[in-house]
Image (spheres, rainbow, N blue to C red):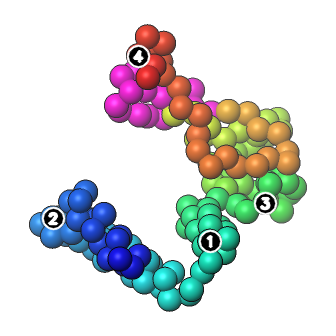
Amino acid sequence: MNIRDYAKDELKRIGMIDSGEPYNDLAAEAILDLIELFDSQGHSGFSASYVVNTFSRLAMFKPLSPLTGEDDEWNDVGNGHLQNKRYSAVFKDKDGTAYNIDGKVFTDDGKAWYTCGDSKVNVTFPYVVPDKPEYVYRNKGDKE
């Protein structure tokens, strides 16, 4: 089985193909287009992993190298707040405190996850943007 057939079968299994939902069908088509292009490039195991990981970060607007905190990385968003140009979830206040507003994601039941004011985590530079936020259970007894 080639990678396109494999991907199509997996997408069918989760109901994304012929779902009757236009978004699912369009997303499945886009995914299969990317799989086809990726397959046409003839990657080996090493290059496949390298390309997938690098593409994934770029497609999610995550930088490939640490944020430096230098002046050229910031946009003034008003009221003494700066937003990082390279990673939009990082801000800096007029007092110089920098933070990632998506640093933590919370749950009360392990099913529904949310961000809030407590999601903010302070950062120091150079700052490596993590692949994932910290997942926090609000009720310790619910932790899986």
Say which of marks 3 and 2 sits in front: 2
Tag 3 secondary structure: loop
- Who's the residue at 67% across and 56% down the image? 87
* Percent coordinates x, y for residue 127 in the rendering: 79, 47
Q: Write down the quadrant of residue 27 in the picture.
A: bottom left
- Who's the residue at 15% across and 70% down the image? 18
Contact, CB < 8 Å: mark 1 with mark 4? no
Q: What amino acid does circle 1 point to?
A: Gly
Q: Is residue 101 left or right of residue 107?
A: right
Residue 10 visible to the viewer = yes
Q: Which residue is identified by label 2?
A: 19
Task: Give the mark nearer the N terminus: 1 vs 2.
Answer: 2
Q: Which residue is identified by label 3?
A: 65
Q: CA distance from mark 3 to mark 1?
A: 23 Å
Tag 4 secondary structure: helix
Q: Which residue is identified by label 1?
A: 45
- Who's the residue at 36% across and 22% down the image? 109
Whether residue 90 is in magenta: the answer is no
Q: Which residue is identified by label 4?
A: 142
Q: CA distance from mark 3 to mark 2?
A: 39 Å
Q: Write down the region rendered in magenta.
A: 106-120
